[in-house]
Image (cartoon, helix red, strand yellow):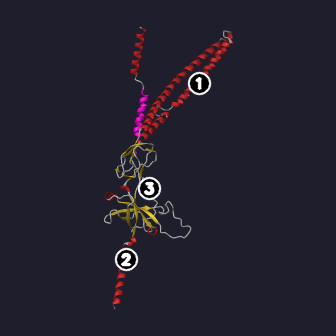
Amino acid sequence: MKRRILLFAVLAVFAVAGGAVALWYFLHGQYHETTDDAYVGGNLVQITPQLAGTVLAIYADDTDYVKSGQRLIELDKSDARVALEQAEAQLAKTVRSVRTLRATSTEGEANVVMRRAELRKAEQDLARRRSIESSGAVSGEELQHAIDAVSSARATLEAARKQLEAQRAQVDRTDVHDHPDVKNAAARVREALLACSRTDLPAPMGGFVARRSVQVGQRVAPGNVLMTVVPLEQVWVDANFKENQLANLRPGQPVTLVADAYGSSIEFHGKLAGFSAGTGSAFALLPAQNATGNWIKVVQRVPVRILLDPKELEAHPLQIGLSMRVDVDTHRRSDERLQRVARQAPAYETQAFNSIDAEAEQVIERIVAENTASPNRGNLAGMNGESAHGGASARR
């Protein structure tokens, strides 16, 4: 009798437990997918120089927080300044050369007028000699000289016209600012100013400095990684779900997360952003090859991106690489798992690298103005007066 009562009790316990499990599954379990194979990820913004130089100063060290645009590293500016001075001098020289071309073009017009007058005079002399040729007052040799003079004057006029066309071709339909040579020299000034600005390396994004490898006095080359900035305000979680857990996961589903660093008393909330295009092993450095030998099926895991609430991140920062426990609420399953929606706006952008266009335009306009300004007529008149007075005194 006691054995029967004990057997009924055990069966009742198993029945209650089974009912509880079934109730939990139908009310909660079938709508939730969980994993503890999840880790905090984030952007590692590498600070690299765009030109070679010697490090003069380092303004941030490991664990320091930096703001976007804050100067991190200063390189030696000597070479860049020399190149800028050379570019500015070349621009000034080019502007003066273009002015000379325009003046030469005016001189060429006057030369054509003079050659045309010489041709007209030679033609008149030839016509006069031919009119009196029948009277015998002009010898045949003198007449031939007149004919040769006309041919020479005509050839000289044609050469002057060609020279004028060549001079006009260099300055035609352009002013000093629009001349190709001036534009080329101005582009070199912009390039030199850009090189000067790149001797200061700013932080592209705000964050914490990590993995500083640069030292003061070090000679760096373009592309060398000098330090890394980690924006912890933009971290996410990569949760590795088993392939048999993916059927009910959809982008936009709410997610509850717990970080081992803070314990279960603090919960993070976010949403499922999307799925990786392949399993973790597919993108591994040495992918698994199961085509030969004894094959054993291994359940694959797919990385799933989860975005976190920025306010919760600000209250409880997470470092990259921390472990997380993830619980996804899968009640909403109507959307497609792999959505084909193209991003319209940039995922990330920075305004730290300011444009130098305004500064370059000011420098170029100043150089062009300084080298195109006409001399003061009053000063020229005064100088001419002083020269005349000095000449008169010398004659006395």
Secondary element under disc 2, as helix, strand or loop, is helix
Task: Give the alpha-carbon distance from disc 2 to disc 3, as whole Å.
Answer: 43 Å
Q: Is residue 193 left or right of residue 141?
A: left
Frontmost of labels 2 and 3 is: 2
Disc 2 or 3, which lies upstream in sequence? Answer: 2
Residue extent of the magenta highlight: 353-373
Numbered disc in front, either 3 or 1: 3
Q: In x, y percent, where is residue 135?
A: 68, 9
Position of residue 47 measured from the top left corner of the image (x, y, whole percent): 41, 49
Depth check: give the residue in front, 185 or 39: 39
Q: Which residue is mark 1?
A: 159
- Which residue extends farthest bottom? 1
Is residue 366 highlighted in magenta? yes
Cα separation between marks 1 and 2: 107 Å
Kindly identify the amino acid type of the residue bearing the numbered disc 3: Arg
- Tell me, yes or no, whether the two marked residues, 1 and 2, touch with CB atoms within 8 Å: no
Going 38% across and 72% down the picture, which residue do you hit? 29
Foreground residue among 251 and 228: 228
Q: Is residue 39 magenta?
A: no
In the rendered view, would you say 99 is above or below 358? Answer: above
Q: Amino acid at mark 1?
A: Ala
Which residue is identified by label 3?
343
Question: Which residue shows up at 55% across the image and 29% down it?
Answer: 166
Q: Determine which residue is flagged by label 2.
A: 21
Crowding at mark 2 (Cα within 10 Å: few <14, some 14-19, many 20+): few
- Could you tell me if the residues under marks 2 and 3 are in contact, i.e. CB atoms within 8 Å? no
Are discs 3 and 1 less than 8 Å apart at CB?
no
Earlier sequence position, callout 1 versus callout 2: 2
Q: Is residue 185 above or below residue 72?
A: above
Circle number at residue 13: none
